[in-house]
Amino acid sequence: MTASGTFTLYLCVDYGGRWDIARTAQTMASEVQMGRLRSTDIDETLFDKYMHQDGIPDPDLCIRTAGEQRISNFLLWQLAYSELYFADCYWPDFDANAFELAIVEYYRRQRRFGLRVDGEAHGGAEFEHKKTVTPMLKQRVITALVLVAAFVWLLVNLTAAEFSLVLLLLVMVAGWEWTNLLHLNRRSSKAGFLGLLLLALAAVGLNIGLFTEFNFALGQQISMIAVGLWAIIFLWLQGYPSSSILWSPRPVLGLIGLLLLVATWVALTSILHREAGRWLLFLAIVIVALADVGGYVAGRLFGKNKLAPIISPGKTWEGFAGGMLLQILLIAGLMWQLPQLRLIELTILVIPVALYSVLGDLFESMIKRHSGVKDSSQLLPGHGGVLDRIDGFMAALPLFSLLLANSSFA
């Protein structure tokens, strides 16, 4: 594919990379033997011209399907500086969405063409390499700062009921993104799903006493249903991709979305309406954030063993351990600042919620992988969509609310 839009297809039949290199070496050796070529003239450029694919540009991207992470003797010479992308789906299932994911991943990578991080080229030539912050990272930081500032201001200045209404709007946006995962392309279908979500939220809001006396018992029952559903989702994660036959049908996945989004909002409002609700909600957010940050940092530094290679190849057991380590530090910090807290009770509140946040992250990754999308939307620059930011909270908050109701913290 070229910039002008032309497309050239090459079929390699009965081809092997080693065979091509050996054939080229034999041809050039014969040329030298017959005096048509001097051995001192042989370099990479000349060798390339004798190759079977002379005139074909080296690929920028090589895509390998079926979860195989090797190039299997294919274009060994030409793929020297190509980016490699390994897709879990089989070739017949590699559709336009899967191809788009590969292209998105390609543009996220920083290509150095043999240059080391310290700036020295593979040929020994020195070159000044300035470390720059990528535009994507800048976007992520700016967006995160704006979101945190807005969240803190709203949390401090609004009442529990008012803040719950603001969060209701956020849940509706997440519901719109869920329609993207369902591939509801018609406006009427999207409107129908959002209408059902709004009706469910309104019904629950009225019955839970959002503007009157808050019904914590109902909130606890809804959170219990959500926690049970997440336990089932854990089994689906373990059985993916075979388990997709159970949850991937559009009506089933749509119903799951409605239940989880409503339960997330109910958990938020239940936490907010408790005594010291703002601080408790802040604690829940810190737990999920530390699990996410610890997972990212430890995964980047030490990650080797994949946590869920089919669902989310970027997540590792080392990253998971890093997230849990930060939870231990959080517990230690809270016990140091608030010695009146009970260690066992605090541990029971923090660790399971952190574990559930990982579950929520993996579940959205599984849905996106099955749906063939990279992000739920592009509403948040550098972060994707709202669902991409709240996936961990969707699993963690109902459990946090349920554990809170059965502890002395309430």
Image (tube, rainbow, N blue to C red):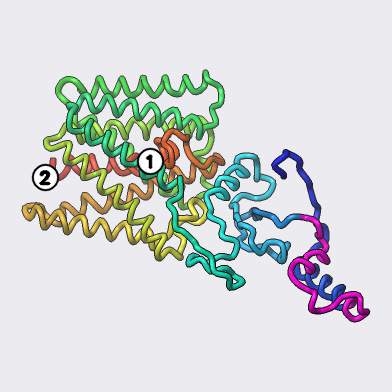
* Element assignment for label 2: loop
Span of residues in magenta: 30-56
Q: Estimate how packed mark 1 is, as few (under 14), some (14 to 19) or many (20 or more) residues with alpha carbons within 10 Å.
A: some
Which is in the foreground here, disc 2 or disc 1? 1
Residue at x 80% of width, y 73% of height:
22
Residue 353 picture location, percent across and down:
28, 48
Residue 164 circle label: none
Q: Which residue is mark 1?
A: 389
Q: Which corner quadrant holds the N terminus?
A: top right
Q: Which corner quadrant holds the C terminus?
A: top left
Residue 326 picture location, percent across and down:
27, 57
Is residue 319 visible in the rendered image? The answer is yes
Residue at x 12% of width, y 37% of height:
276
Residue at x 54% of width, y 40% of height:
373
Quick check: is 211 in the magenta stretch? no
Q: Is residue 254 above or below residue 231?
A: above
Q: Estimate how packed mark 2 is, as few (under 14), some (14 to 19) or many (20 or more) residues with alpha carbons within 10 Å.
A: few
Q: For residue 64, what is the image quadrant?
A: bottom right
Front-lying residue, 129 or 316: 129
Left or right of 276? Residue 233 is right
Q: For residue 163, what is the image quadrant?
A: top left
Q: For residue 364, what is the image quadrant?
A: top left
Q: Which residue is mark 2?
A: 408
Query: How many numbered discs?
Result: 2
Mark 2 and mark 1 lie on one chain; the one further toward the N terminus is 1
Mark 2: which amino acid? Ser
Q: Is residue 84 above or below residue 213?
A: below
Front-lying residue, 357 or 319: 319
Front-lying residue, 85 or 217: 85
